[in-house]
Image (tube, rainbow, N blue to C red):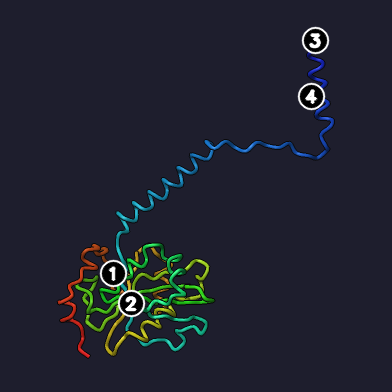
């Protein structure tokens, strides 16, 4: 027994002696179960934040723009594309739009085009960098605030992460206003009260906050009556 113990000790000393000086011993990676509490905590945080916003911050800021348009609102390197129908969507941008907006984007756009919506694309370096949509007041039955037929509502603003910080979406919005906004008309936009980045961007673009209201129900916001909208539409 004593000889066996001395042999084991000698082997351990030999292993330590042959290890290069200054070399750290390798540590085993932590087992998968160690990370489970951290992942669970992250999901709980997202769930709690979502519930908090739905219960205590379930409101929208409403903004109005009454002009005039700034002279440098359009960037020279931003190509603006106006699309009012599926047929008007350039073929070279279709795949990029699906990559940006998801596989059901064409179904959503067809629904919007039937109800007077117009898609605005900001293209930079051959890629869609930012998007917006607009619709005249005559095509709304109900919105946050009363709309005149000539008013313009801007919605569904989105910019790709790699193009953010260049103020491309405000430039795209102003291009839409310069094209669509008629004399005496106003432009409106809304966003969630907790979307501080959008609030800053909207206010820097010259929009003025006029109300904070509960969000509209989808059925009420997008309810569309063709005959009623045709009666409200301005005659050329």
Residue picked out by circle 1 = 111
User: Going 22% across and 91% down the picture, which residue do you hit?
Assistant: 236
Which callout, 3 or 2, points at the residue further toward the start of the chain?
Answer: 3
Distance CA(mark 4)–CA(mark 2):
78 Å
Q: Secondary structure at mark 2?
A: loop
- Among the two numbered marks 3 and 4 on one chain, the one whose residue lies closer to the N terminus: 3
Please report whichever mark, 4 or 1, sits nearer to the chain's N-terminal start.
Answer: 4
Dot 3: element: helix
x then y, percent, for residue 23: 78, 39
Q: Marks 2 and 1, Cα distance to the nearest angstrom?
A: 10 Å
Considering depth in this image, is 192 or 154 the residue closer to the camera?
A: 154
The alpha-carbon separation of the residues under discs 4 and 1 comes to: 75 Å
Q: CA distance from mark 3 to mark 4?
A: 16 Å
Marks 3 and 2, how far apart in space?
91 Å
Q: First in sequence: mark 4 or mark 2?
A: 4
In this figure, which residue is indicated by the disc labeled 3? Answer: 2
Mark 3 or 1, nearer chain start: 3
Give the residue number, with chain letter if any, for mark 2: 85
Label 3 crowd bin: few (<14), some (14–19), many (20+), radius 10 Å: few
Residue behind mark 4: 12
């Amino acid at each position: 027994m004593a000889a066996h113990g001395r042999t084991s000790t000698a082997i351990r000393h030999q292993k330590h002696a042959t290890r290069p000086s200054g070399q750290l011993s390798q540590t085993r990676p932590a087992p998968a179960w160690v990370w489970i509490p951290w992942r669970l905590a992250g999901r709980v945080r997202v769930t709690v934040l979502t519930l908090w916003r739905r219960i205590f911050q379930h409101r929208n800021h409403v903004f109005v723009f009454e002009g005039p348009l700034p002279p440098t609102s359009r960037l020279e390197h931003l190509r603006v594309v106006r699309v009012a129908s599926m047929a008007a969507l350039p073929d070279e941008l279709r795949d990029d739009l699906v990559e940006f907006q998801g596989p059901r984007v064409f179904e959503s756009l067809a629904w919007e085009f039937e109800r007077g919506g117009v898609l605005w694309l900001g293209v930079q370096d051959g890629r869609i960098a930012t998007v917006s949509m607009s619709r005249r007041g005559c095509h709304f039955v109900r919105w946050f605030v009363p709309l005149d037929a000539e008013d313009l509502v801007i919605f569904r603003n989105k910019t790709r992460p790699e193009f953010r910080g260049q103020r491309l979406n405000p430039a795209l919005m102003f291009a839409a206003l310069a094209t669509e906004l008629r004399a005496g008309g106003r432009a409106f936009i809304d966003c969630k009260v907790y979307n501080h980045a959008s609030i800053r961007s909207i206010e820097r673009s010259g929009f003025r906050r006029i109300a904070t209201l509960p969000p509209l129900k989808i059925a009420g916001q997008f309810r569309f009556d063709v005959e009623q909208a045709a009666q409200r539409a301005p005659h050329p």
